Amino acid sequence: MSILVYTENWDGKFKKLSFELVSYASAIAKEMGVAVTALSIGNVADSELALLGNFGASKILNVNDDRFNSLDNKALSKAVVAAAQSENAKVVVFANNNLGKAIAPRVSVKLDAGLVAGVTSLPISMDPFVVKKKVFTGKAFANVQIDTDVKIITFSQNSYELVETDAAAAVESFDPGVADSDFATTVEETNKVTGKVLLMDAEIVVSGGRGMKSGDNWTGLEDLADALGAGLACSRPVSDEGWRPHDEHVGQTGKMIAPNLYFAFGISGAIQHLGGVSSSKVIVAVNKDAEAPIFEAADYGIIGDVNTVIPKFIEAVKEL
């Protein structure tokens, strides 16, 4: 038996997210007395694959097949199922991101496995197998029991600390036996964001809302984000007004993020917005309305005009 972790790579490199998943799976494996197998799909160098062993993987199944570059969900799910069956995996762990949420339900059906999405911590109990997740846009927690033989989890990013070990992992080539007919997606063009910190990877996020008054007032937020090495985000009304691009919109209808530090400038704190950022470790809110709902969710709050506060933030960061 084993625990299988689906690890994503970006241009042949793993990011913190993949190491976090392996660390999380390793902790569960110790409780169950089993090993961790990491599945990597794509062209990844052996030296990069070996890094997964540093976080608890004892075996790495490497699928090096250019056909998977299309990120076809049908083909990817078949590859995960083949790996899970080959390793007799009783728990399969995905990231709770767009790709994980697309593949996990398919794998769940094929393995006749119970699925819980957005898990935030280690299982509360192993027998029965009970996991915890946020509900009601982060206002409460639910304990969910999985009774099936195989269990599938999508784990929320930034919910578990990285735990490095001295262990080494064995890298094995793996053929999932996926046919050409399983690849129904054709990639005609790829456009990648360059020159800025991606929101899903950012440890710090600087975000602005309608209280910024205009898209012309974003220079201060851009300067602060640059000084902090942070990602830049916005609320939905801002992207709807065209002040900022839609790929910066965070919230229930945008990107769901979980940075260590989230700055909310001029954001009132509508429940739809808080639903996408409630997993942030620390929230700092700046708003001139002392009754703004964002202060109920914030760890630190400043009542004041954003155009006055932002320059002082920038000055303080540069001094540090």
Image (spheres, rainbow, N blue to C red):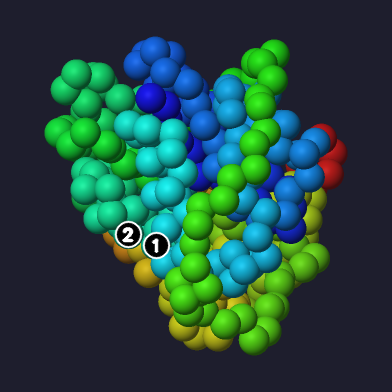
Q: How many marks?
A: 2
Q: Is residue 315 left or right of residue 5?
A: right
**Callout 1: SS:** helix
Q: Nearer the viewer, residue 65 or 318?
A: 65
Quadrant in which residue 92 is drawn: top left
Q: What's the amino acid at mark 2? A: Arg
**Residue that mark 2 sits on:** 106
Percent x, y for residue 316?
Answer: 76, 42
CB of mark 2 within 8 Å of CB of mark 1?
yes
Residue positioned 30% across, 25% down in the render: 123
Residue positioned 21% across, 48% down in the render: 112
Quadrant in which residue 307 is drawn: bottom right
| Alpha carbon distance from label 2 to label 1 | 8 Å
Foreground disc of the pair 2, 1:
2
Residue 148 visible to an observer of this rendering:
yes
Percent x, y for residue 33?
Answer: 39, 13
Q: Is residue 85 left or right of residue 257?
A: left
Q: Which mark is residue 102?
A: 1
Q: Nearer the viewer, residue 22 or 298?
A: 22
Q: Alpha-carbon neighbours of circle 2 within 10 Å: few (<14), some, or many (≥20)?
A: some
Q: Alpha-carbon neighbours of circle 1 within 10 Å: few (<14), some, or many (≥20)?
A: some
Residue 202 visible to an observer of this rendering:
no
Q: Which mark is residue 36?
A: none
